[in-house]
Image (cartoon, coloured by chain):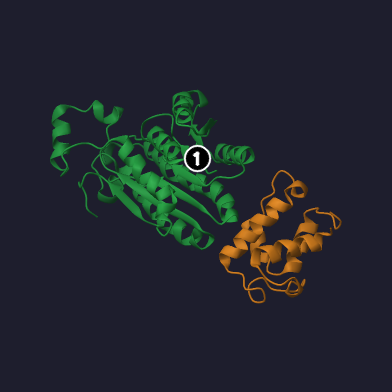
Chain colours: A orange, B green
Amino acid sequence: MTLEEKVKEIVVDGLHCNADEVKMEADLVNDLGADSLDQAELMMNIEDAFKDHLGADSNISETDVEKLKTVGSIVEYLRGRGVPDNL
Amino acid sequence: MKTAVVTGSARGIGRAICERLASDGVGRVVVCDLKAEWCADTVEAVRALGAESEAFEINVGDPASVEAGVEAIVAKFGGIDICVNNAGITRDGLLMRMSEADWDAVLDINLKGAFLMTKAVCRHMMRARSGSIVNIASVVGIMGNAGQCNYSASKGGLIAFTKSAARELGARGVRVNAVAPGFIKSKMTDVLADDVKKRMLDIIPMKRFGEPEEIAKAVSFLAGDDSAYITGQTLSVNGGMLMP
C-alpha cells in the first residue's frame, strides 16, 4: 500500500465519506465535512497508524495540525517526517 | 467483557468502587495506585468477587506514568470501557498560611491527574465509540470549605472539567460524569475529635456519615448502561448536607 492510499483510507474511515471524494486537494472541513472533533480524531488516527515511521515522538504538534487542511497536506507532512511512499 | 480502571484504588473509596464494579459483572478491574504492592488487598478482593484483576502503578500527576500505564493496560486488555478518576490527596490549611507547594500538589493530583487520565483513555474510548468516565469530586467543590482552598478548587475544577469533557466527547458515545461525596467514613474522619464530628453531623440531614460503598453505588450507576443518556452531570451523595 502506498502512503497516499493509507492516508485516504484513514480519512474515509474517520470522516465516513466516499473514497472518490477524497482527492489530494480535498479540504477536510469544506469538502469533506470534518468538524473540529473529527480533525482531532483524524490526527490521532494518523499518529497511531504511522507511529512506527514517526519515531519516538509520534505526536503531530498543534502548530503542524493547523497546517494540515487538505488530504494532500497530510501526505506531504508525513513524507517530510520520513514516512516512505511505499509502506 | 468490560474493563474498568480505577485510580487511587488501593484502599478507601477507590477500593469500594473496584469491588462494586466487580459485583456488577465488570469482567476486568484494573487497580491503580502509586505502588503496585499497595493494591494487593483490593486485587484479591476483586478476584474473590469473580472478576479478573491486576495492579498497575500509575502516578496520575506524572504524564509519562499515565501514558505508559494506560498504554500497558490497553495492550494487555484490548481497551478500557470505564475509567474512574478517584485518586486524590488533601493538604489542608488556611489560605493565609497555605504554601504554594501544597496548592500545587493538590491541583496536580486531583485536577491535572484527572485531565491526564481522561486524555489518555478517551483516545481508546472515542475509537470504540463507547465509554464512561466518572470523576470523583466532592461536596466542597460545590460549597467550599474553610481550610481547603486547594482541595475545593481542585474539586470544583473537576466538576467544570467533567462538563466540558462531556460536551467534547458526547458525539463519540463517551460519557463523562462526576460523583460529589459528602463526609464519608474513612481513616480521615475516624480521627476527628468528637465535637468536630458533632458539628459535621449537625449539618447533615441524615445525621450520619456516608459509607465508601454508598459512593461506589453512585459510581456503579454512572459507569454502567443504566445511565446511558446521562452525561456532564454531578451526582451528589452527601446525606442531604448540600442540595445544589
Q: Residue at image x 34%, y 35%?
A: B90
Residue B228 x, y percent position in the rendering: 43, 56
Q: Residue at image x 75%, y 49%?
A: A54
Q: Residue at image x 37%, y 40%?
A: B103
Q: Amino acid at mark 1?
A: Val
Question: Is residue B153 visible in this depiction of the protein?
Answer: no
Residue B72 x, y percent position in the rendering: 61, 37
Q: Is residue B94 left or right of residue B198?
A: right
SS type, badge 1: strand
Viewer-nearest residue: B10 or B151: B10
Could you tell me which quadrant the C terminus of chain A lies in? bottom right
Q: Within 10 Å of the Cα at label 1, are there few (<14), some (14-19), or many (20+) other Cα atoms?
A: many
Viewer-nearest residue: B150 or B230: B230
Viewer-nearest residue: B192 or B213: B213
Residue B192 x, y percent position in the rendering: 21, 28
Q: Mark 1 highlights which residue?
A: B5
Question: Is residue B9 visible in this depiction of the protein?
Answer: yes
Q: Is residue B175 left or right of residue B129?
A: left
Whether A35 is drawn above or below A84: the answer is below
Q: Is residue A14 left or right of residue A73?
A: left
Q: Chain of mark 1?
A: B
Could you tell me which quadrant the N terminus of chain A lies in? bottom right
Q: Residue at image x 55%, y 41%?
A: B63
Viewer-nearest residue: B92 or B197: B197
Q: How many marks?
A: 1
Residue B137 x, y percent position in the rendering: 35, 45
- Residue B151 occupies quadrant: top left
- Residue B238 occupies quadrant: top left
